[in-house]
Image: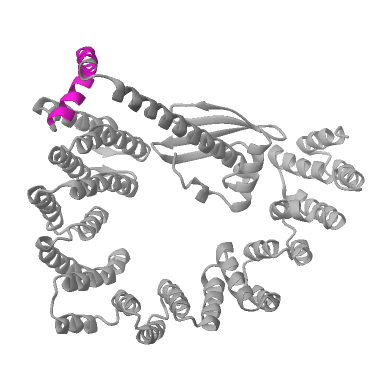
Amino acid sequence: MESNWKRYFLPHILERGKKCLREGRVGEIRRTTHGYEAIVRGEQKYHVKIDIQGQFIEQMSCDCFYVQNKGQYCKHMAAVLYELEERQMIWEKERTNHLEELNELLEESSKEELQRFLMKIATDSSIFERELRMFLTGQASKKEWMRIQNEINGMFLKYSDEYGFINFKNTGLFCEDMRVLLQEKIDRMIVYENRREAFELLSYIWDKICITESGDSEKLICILAEECFSRLGRILEQEKEQKLKTDIYEWLQKHLSEGTVNLMTEKMYDFLLECFQEIIFLEKKLKLLDKKIEKEEDAEEEWMKRKHGRDLAQRLQIMMQLSYPEEECTKYKLKFWNIPEIRQMDIQKQLQEHKYEAAEQLICESIQMDKMQNDCQEKYCRLLADLYQQQGRKKEYLDQMILYFIRYHQESVELWRKIRSTVKQEDAEKWEEIRDEILKDVNLPYFRYKIMAEEKMYAQLMEELKQEKHLEILDQYEKILHRKFPEKMLRLYADCLLSAVSDMTGREKYRDLAAHLKKMKKYPGGSEIAGQIIENWKKRYNKRTALIEELEKIERIK
């Protein structure tokens, strides 16, 4: 399962997912053909489905209110993923222990015992025999190579129609099956140092991908480019002979010299420019880049224009690697001085050489030149902060970090803590004053609430939430506010519910309202206020049968 799955969830949803898991509300998790299914207990039983292709989460669903009505990932999904993550850690630990035990047994075994065992398995299994031959000889037999090639062809046929088109639905399935094939076949070849045949199969697969049309071409190309080129990279890292490296380069160059510029060729360019750093390839890369840059200058597509600056900077980098005369490099640099990437290269060079004054001057010049490009402004803001820190200019560093936080990263609690730590190291008494000034410029309420909670500004947070009147946000901070302001929280929950009920329809939404009424009953005096709301709603919305049923369930709870 992918390690960075938490990026799909809002922070407060992750916290609630952890809480669900700690409270033991995640039931049995069942493995399915596409992933996992689980029951998470709450006000009712919620059914969670998580579809996984290889290591990647393909799709998630839950029948709770939050998903059905807001279309966002919920705490029930997060709880299941946390449980799967814990299980995976246990499985990996057990697997490591088993392998260590196996290694000890192998060390104690004689050569004759191992030979007898290998012969027996090879006799019983033709698959194992092929694996053993490849391991011992370092190459697959011609028959085995053809078998793998036929398997690849069969996979393309399986998922495409009579015209060779892979529809949207089949694209994900095709990518996953191809990923498995690469893991099972190509990875073994690389491990057994059978790198040439691994390259030939990878090039065969990529050549077929290049002529395959799909209903989700971007997904097809991005996933399989990553799979194919990561393995080609490993081959290049391990290969000592120049011949194979040259063959791989020429295969890439042949594709790129055909003249087409699209997502496929961009993936190939990215790989070629990143690898092949030997002198023998640099001159060739320079010529290839010149042709690409020429096409980009006449391009109408926005994505091609965006690549232009990067490629010009890459060309300058190669010129420097090839020890072109400084005069020629400077002339080239000045010709394209309006390109941000060229100046950013120069800034990094000045910083590496500790020429801080020149670097600062160039950053300030670039801020003016690129004032319409927000991504560049963000880089320059951070570069200035780093420069001031390296110089020990504490006040300028702090001002720049505050500016960086306000303009570009109000969501970053980590950056906020860094600013706070910097201030307190100099003068702890000034922190509250500086903090309040920064907060005036934090214009995104959700992030302002996070900071107030971080700073334990509970009274101010309470006042802001009274203005917001948002149930989900109120739930997020209920744990830290209900003990300090029980009366205000109770009143605020009542106000939020009374405002929300008129627009809510459907049993799931009514269950959510009822759950909040149940929560209110736990507050001092909450049973009475919740009871008043229930009576009011039963009279006012007497035709909403589902709402009345949910309210009556709450009434029965003492």
| Closest to the observer, 260 or 56 | 56
Residue 508, can we see it?
A: yes
Q: Taking 21 as reference, is 277 left or right? A: left
Residue 349, image x, y percentages: 30, 77
User: Which SS does the magenta portion mostly show?
Assistant: helix
Residue at image position (20%, 16%) is 112
Residue 374, percent across and down?
Answer: 44, 73
Asked if the magenta segment contains residue 418, the reply would be no
Q: Is residue 291 above or below residue 542?
A: below
Q: Is residue 401 left or right of residue 20?
A: left
Please state the extent of the stretch shown in magenta in the rendering: 114-137
- 434 left or right of 411 in image: right
- Asked if residue 154 is positioned above or below residue 301 in the image, the reply reads above
Name the spot of residue 125 as percent of width and height, x first: 23, 15
The answer to whether residue 52 is above or below residue 107 is below
> By what rule are the colours in the image chosen?
one colour
Count of numbered circles in the view? 0
